[in-house]
Image (cartoon, rainbow, N blue to C red):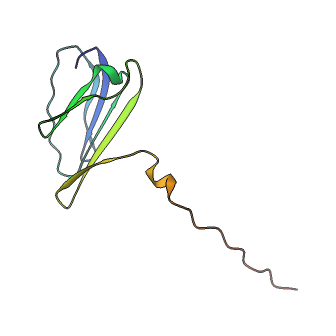
Amino acid sequence: ITQRAWVRVTVDGEVAQEGTLESGDVKDYQAEQSIAIRTGNGGGVSLTLNGEDLGPMGDVGKVVERTWVVDQGEITEQVPGADAAKPSPQPTQTPTPAG
């Protein structure tokens, strides 16, 4: 934590941390399936994932949420709205029987 920030960390579907952290705080989490981090100060929270420095989560004072999932041993970041790019099936109309 580089600046005071409210942070919620969800590990494998369970909230592992929720509250305000202070500059200099360091937290370590391990997940089997997923990890999601939400903060009210994206610029105050820097991340490291498996030894790789990911830098700040976002801009100072901005709400940011990032999520990673493990799928067949691979870690991938879920991108919000990625499913929105997929076309939705169009509804079909059922003919009304003549009565």
Q: Which residue is nearer to you in this view: 10 or 54?
A: 54
Picture coordinates of residue 34, whole percent (x, y): 25, 48
Q: Which residue: 31% across, 19% down?
A: 5
Q: Which residue: 29% across, 23% down?
A: 19
Q: Which residue: 23% across, 14% down?
A: 22
Quadrant of residue 14 in the image?
top left
* Residue 95 falls left or right of residue 8: right
Residue closest to the far right: 99
Quadrant of residue 39 in the image?
top left
* Residue 4 falls left or right of residue 79: left
The C terminus appears in which quarter of the rendering? bottom right
Q: Which residue is nearer to you in this view: 16 or 76?
A: 76
Q: Is residue 77 above or below residue 27?
A: below
Picture coordinates of residue 68, whole percent (x, y): 27, 45
Q: Is residue 32 above or below residue 43?
A: below
Picture coordinates of residue 54, whole percent (x, y): 23, 33
Picture coordinates of residue 51, whole percent (x, y): 11, 37
Q: Which residue is nearer to you in this view: 67 or 8?
A: 67
The N terminus appears in which quarter of the rendering? top left
Total marks shown come to: 0
Quadrant of residue 57 in the image?
top left
Q: Is residue 83 above or below residue 98?
A: above
Residue closest to the far left: 51
Q: Which residue: 42% across, 23% down?
A: 62
